[in-house]
Every structure is written in structure tokens, then in C-alpha cells.
Amino acid sequence: MKIEIPCDVALILDTLEENGHEGYAVGGCVRDAILGREPEDWDITTSAKPEEVKALFRRTIDTGIQHGTVTVMLGNEGYEVTTYRMDGEYEDHRHPKEVLFTPNLVEDLKRRDFTINAMAYNPRIGIVDEFDGIGDIKRRCIRCVGKAEERFEEDALRMLRGIRFAGQLQFEMEEATKQAIRKQASTLVNVSAERIRTELTKLLISDGADRLMLAVETGLISYFLPEFENMLQTPQNNPHHQYDVGHHSMEAVRHVNRQWKGFCAENGMSKKHHVALCYAALLHDVAKPDCKMTDKEGIDHFHSHPELGAEKAKKILRRLKFDNDTISIVSRLIQFHDRRHENCYIDGGYSPKGKRTMRRLMNQIGLDAMPLLFVLQRADLLSQSNYKQEEKLSKLEAGIRCYHEIIEAEDAVTLKDLAIGGRELMELGIKPGPQIGKILQRLLEVVLDEPEKNTVEILTELVQEMK
């Protein structure tokens, strides 16, 4: 099998071979090339020692030289070149006590996690596939190299990585590999929250985000997101729903991912926004198990779950070591996800009441989160039952059109949109201090209801009346 490799990678392999060393592209890049996916990185493994690699290339960086890794810089691109190695004894279910270099490629491949990641490629020799990674790709199967228990004993993060690969590639997990995760799930406590967050995030933004259920099936979820288990155990006996809280939330994640590509292109959004949306979809109903009450007709209700859910999501995201900006966006999306856009469009036009309500929502949630809210709300509605779904979606679309009309009209929705600011208030005789903020807020309340009053003249008159 022939694989197309970048010119820089070919240059590195040729340089190694011309100087008496072996060199191969290895790991995920080989897997992705076989699958017809664009590899994110091209990693190289070699029989050359780190100091020998450094001697062959003009610009190198000692990325992880104690583990045999040197980054070779060609232009602005860096390529990790790692010496064949065998890992010593693992003491903490995460890191080897020592790294031993070996002249044998197969020994290096033996230490890798899954068969689909344990293949190497050299244009002259072809693919080296000692563990039937190609066969597992054809079978669409995630299987450990050698004994799964040993691989997970070495590095507990591999359990979550296996689930992540199953999601990204939409593969199934081999039964023996699943059994090993069940047996060793508790060792995930040895893995940092940052590493867990990285794997969970890659899973959630993939087309196979529903493979999160593998973490439930194997018991792994208990060690990084126990709240999701409670969500799965909370039915929603309500005409608006057809799933329990957990499955409804997974459906919402799926619908977010289906919308994302088009939405991203239209709105200039980044991967960070995609991540925030997926976590908001996963956790938008996280407080429903705590809020559930059943009326005398047997109908379930979940009053105040958006507000409580926002606070609960903050705690979860802090536990996963997310940055404050992501925590802020996700919690705001959850807090306002249940806002319905009633009366936005009446008799062929946007109602004043609907516009007032929309402007206030824009002010409360923030303009950075507002476009994301519509994506979350659509995903939420599409994950409910068919009961009044068309009507609800129609109201949402009317709300979106109303929002765009407000944006186009440049109506004031934040303090910085006001025609006058703190400096102008001081010129009108207002002393510096808290009073300025209070007056500006009162002015904003006026123009949120009546945007035509956002002029210097009218706001100045209002300030004079407030003095």
C-alpha cells in the first residue's frame, strides 16, 4: 500500500536513511492516511539516537530529549522525530519509570496503545503492521496492542483515548478491550483533569460523540462525569420529551455537531465556540435530576433547572480545569437555554413587545453568546418529542430574524452602545463614583424598551430629570 506523505516528511526519512539510520512515519498519521483522513501531525520514529538526529538537521528543538524526542524544524513546520524505545516499568498508571532505546522498530510499536496506532510507513519498505492494524481498520474496531489490561495498567488515560478514537472514527470497541476498561476504570483517578478534559472534548466535538455511552457501559464515567449517570437515570414523563435526560442531552450534542460546520462558516466562529456549545448541550439539563417533581397527573416538571444547571455546570467545568471564558459562555448558554421567543413575529411584522424582550435577552446573555444560544436552542428542540415541535421551531426562527433586525438597526443593548457615557455624565455635574454606573444602567433600561431614545439630547434630558 502506498501512502502520500508530505515533502518535508520524505526529506527527513531520506536524510536518516542516507546516513545509515532507519526512519518511518508512525502512529496516527499512518492510520489517518489509510482512512483517507488528513493527518493533523506527522510523527517520525527512527533508529537514530537523539544526538544523531540533531547532528543531521540544521534547526532542532529538544522537545523531549530525555524520552528520545527531537523536533526537526523545516521552515515554519516542526516534526517530532523519536528514537525507537521501550518503556520501563510504570509506577503511577501514567508514566514509565525509565525509557530504554532499542534498535528494533517492532519493539517500539509493541509499546503503543491500539493496533490502529501501531503502524509505521516508509515509502521504500511500505507499511509495517505487526499487530493487524489494517485489519482492525477494515473491521472498524478499536483493539489494544497485546493484552489490553497491560496497556491500561501502563497508562490509564488510554481507556478514555480508546473511547475517543471510537467516537472520532465511529468504530466499535473490541469486547476484551471493553472488559479491561471495566476492570481497571478506577485507575483513571491517576490521570490529571487536564488530560481527561482534552480526550472528552475531542470526543464531544466528533461525529461519534454518542460513544460517550461506552464510558457509561464500562463504568469509566463515574470517575470523571458522575453527573451524567444521574441524568441517564432521570426519565422525563412529559409530552415534550421522548428520552431520559441523559439520552436527550446526547441527542442535543449530536444536533449541535450537525449544525456546526454551516454555522461556523456563516458566523466566523472558532473551535473554542464549538467546544463551548457541545458542553452546553451535554450539560444544559444537568440539574433536572435535582429539580424533578411529578404532578398529580403523573407529568414530570423541572422548574428552575436552567439557573441551577448553570451553577452546576460551572462546578463541573472548573473540576475539568476549563478556562474562565469557556466556563462563562457555557454557564450563560445553560442559564438562558429555555427562553422561548414568544410574540416576536405577529401579523407579518415583529412586535414591539417581542423586540423589547429580545433586546433584554441580548443584554443579559451577552452578544458573544447570543448566536450560540440559537444553535443550542435548535439542538434542544430537535432532541425533544414531535409534540408541538414545528410550532416551537417556527417561534425560534422568528426570534432569530428578530435578533438580526435588532443588530442591523444597531439598537443599543449594552452600556457601551449608549449615546452618552461616564465622561458626559461628569460634564453634566454627576460626581465620579457608583452613582455614574447606576444612572447609565437606568438609561440603558429606557433605551432597551425604546431604542429611539438613544440620542445625546434625549438621554441628557433624562439625566437632568434624575439629578
Image (cartoon, grey):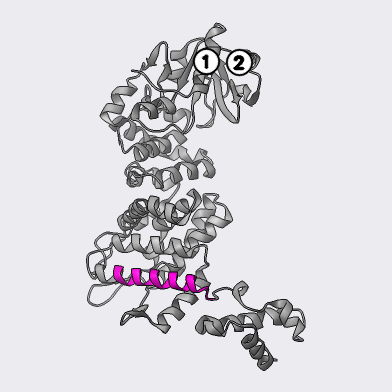
Q: Amino acid at mark 2?
A: Val
Residue denoted by label 1:
46
Seen from this angle, which residue lies furthest bottom? 465
Closest to the observer: 460 or 106? 460
374 to 83, vertically: above or below: below
Residue denoted by label 2:
53
Residue 404 appears in the picture as rendered: yes
Q: Residue at x 64, y 80 (%)?
A: 440
| Alpha carbon separation for disc pair 2 and 1 | 9 Å
Is residue 410 in the magenta section? Answer: yes
Instruction: Answer with the quarter of the image where residue 137 lies.
Output: top left
Which percent across, then down, holds residue 41?
49, 30
**Circles 2, 1 touching at the beta carbon (< 8 Å):** yes
Write the start and end of the magenta stretch as one range: 393-411
Q: Which element is circle 2 on?
A: helix
Mark 1, Cα crowd under 10 Å, few <14 / some 14-19 / many 20+, is: many
29 to 163, vertically: above or below: above
Q: Residue at x 39, y 70 (%)?
A: 401
Q: Which element is circle 1 on?
A: strand
3 to 377, vertically: above or below: above
Q: Amino acid at mark 1?
A: Thr
Q: Residue at x 42, y 11 (%)?
A: 124
